């Protein structure tokens, strides 16, 4: 008997209808699908990317920090709230001249142009003028400090400047009117001319002797700086004191000074003489004798308070501190506590004569 085998079913081929359905699904024909074009219109939205480049623009915030730079002037203004220090006046052109007591008007040959500021300052020296009975008064450029009647009214001309002290230093510009110089004077020239000097005395032939040395400074008025307005502040205390030449010790002014305190000393008036040689007296001002001098009393008296300073100069010290020269003017700062002391720079004061008046200004 033959075996009967069941036949294996063969795969059925896809029918045409199924293929059509599959193709329909693959091609999207089963429903309306959004066209690609709207998708491509998203490109403008992708351009938002450049908009995100605003980030560098937001960095402008950093640029606005320039405000800190603009604040710099405010900072410098607070650092320097005060005005800059005033400029100093220009230095004058200076000349030296010796005026003699025995000569009439003396041409210094210093030409003063118009519109110049002129300063005349006493440096050293003394002279004498006539005196009834043959006596002589030795004075400095400020002249005799008391009223004086000349004993030489006959055969002499009146003094050039009757209103000024007898024996004082006077001057004139060209043939202009005479004026008092004294220890110092500052004036402005109105016209040009040579500068002349002489002693204010009626008779020059009665043994007038001596000379006065002065320093003359010239500055064009156009170069002068306007005066600076003084700022309010502490005011100095002022003292007047007369220093005698014939006192053998330091003269205590009674002006107390504390360590670090500052002040100035200025010559006001007077002359004095120091030790003699052959019977002659050397009359000088506070600047002392301007030439080399060897004392005939050397070794017979004490030593000079300040060997390096001129004979006859005005010297000072504070308490027991070091000695310093005053001369016509000096500034000081107290190195210790003590009173201000003065004396003449001489080794022997027994043969000295005269007085020097000074003004002392002490800051608080």
Image (cartoon, rainbow, N blue to C red):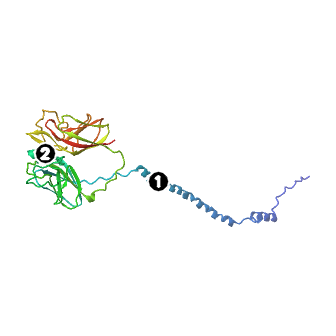
Q: Please, what secondary structure does the residue beneath circle 2 have?
A: strand
- Whether residue 287 sits left or right of residue 48 in the image: it is left
- Whether residue 284 sits left or right of residue 65 in the image: it is left
Give how far across and how far down residue 215 sits, in percent: 19, 51
Distance (Cα) linking label 1 and label 2: 73 Å
Q: Are marks 1 and 2 in contact (CB under 8 Å)?
A: no
Give how far across and how far down residue 216 sits, in percent: 19, 53
Camera-side residue of 254 and 196? 254
Could you say which disc has been placed on residue 326 in the image? Answer: none
Q: Quadrant of residue 39?
A: bottom right
The crowding category of the residue bearing disc 2, from other C-alpha atoms within 10 Å (few below 14, some 14 to 19, many at least 20), is: some
Quadrant location of the C terminus in the rendered image? top left
Give how far across and how far down residue 68 sits, in percent: 48, 53
* Residue highlighted by disc 1: 71
Residue at the image point whose x is 42% and y is 52% from the top: 77
Residue 86 can be seen in this image: yes
Could you say which disc has been placed on residue 137 in the image? Answer: 2
Q: Please, what secondary structure does the residue beneath circle 1 have?
A: loop
Camera-side residue of 25 and 246? 246
User: Which of the two discs, 1 and 2, labels the residue nearer the N terminus?
Assistant: 1
Residue at the image point whose x is 14% and y is 35% from the top: 350
Nearest to viewer (mark 1 / mark 2)? 2
Q: Quadrant of residue 51?
A: bottom right
Q: Is residue 15 above or below residue 133?
A: below
């Amino acid at each position: 008997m033959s075996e009967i085998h069941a036949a294996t079913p063969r795969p059925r081929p896809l029918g045409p209808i199924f293929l059509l359905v599959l193709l329909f699904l693959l091609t999207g024909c089963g429903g309306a699908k959004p066209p690609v074009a709207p998708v491509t219109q998203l490109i403008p939205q992708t351009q938002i990317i450049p908009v995100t480049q605003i980030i560098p623009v937001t960095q402008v915030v950093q640029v606005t920090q320039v405000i800190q730079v603009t604040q710099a002037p405010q900072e410098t203004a607070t650092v320097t709230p005060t005005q800059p220090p005033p400029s100093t006046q220009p230095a004058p052109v200076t000349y030296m001249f010796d005026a003699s007591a025995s000569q009439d008007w003396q041409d210094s040959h210093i030409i003063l142009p118009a519109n110049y500021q002129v300063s005349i300052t006493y440096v050293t020296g003394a002279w004498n003028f006539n005196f009834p009975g043959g006596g002589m008064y030795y004075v400095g450029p400020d002249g005799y400090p008391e009223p004086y009647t000349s004993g030489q009214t006959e055969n002499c001309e009146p003094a050039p400047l009757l209103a000024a002290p007898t024996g004082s230093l006077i001057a004139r510009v060209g043939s202009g009117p005479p004026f008092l110089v004294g220890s110092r004077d500052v004036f402005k020239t109105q016209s040009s001319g040579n500068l002349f000097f002489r002693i204010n005395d009626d008779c020059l032939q009665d043994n007038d002797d001596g000379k006065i040395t002065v320093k003359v400074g010239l500055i064009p008025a156009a170069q002068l700086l306007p005066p600076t307005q003084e700022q309010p502040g502490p005011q100095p205390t002022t003292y007047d004191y007369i220093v005698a030449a014939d006192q053998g010790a330091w003269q205590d002014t009674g002006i107390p000074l504390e360590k670090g305190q500052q002040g100035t000393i200025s010559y006001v008036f007077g002359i004095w003489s120091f030790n003699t040689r052959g019977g002659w007296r050397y009359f000088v001002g506070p600047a002392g004798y301007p030439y080399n001098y060897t004392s005939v009393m050397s070794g017979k008296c004490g030593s000079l308070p300040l060997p390096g300073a001129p004979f006859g100069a005005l010297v000072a010290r504070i308490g027991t501190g070091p000695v310093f020269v005053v001369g016509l003017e000096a500034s000081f700062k107290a190195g210790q506590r003590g009173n201000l002391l003065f004396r003449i720079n001489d080794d022997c004061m027994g043969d000295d004569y005269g007085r020097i008046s000074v003004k002392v200004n002490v800051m608080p």
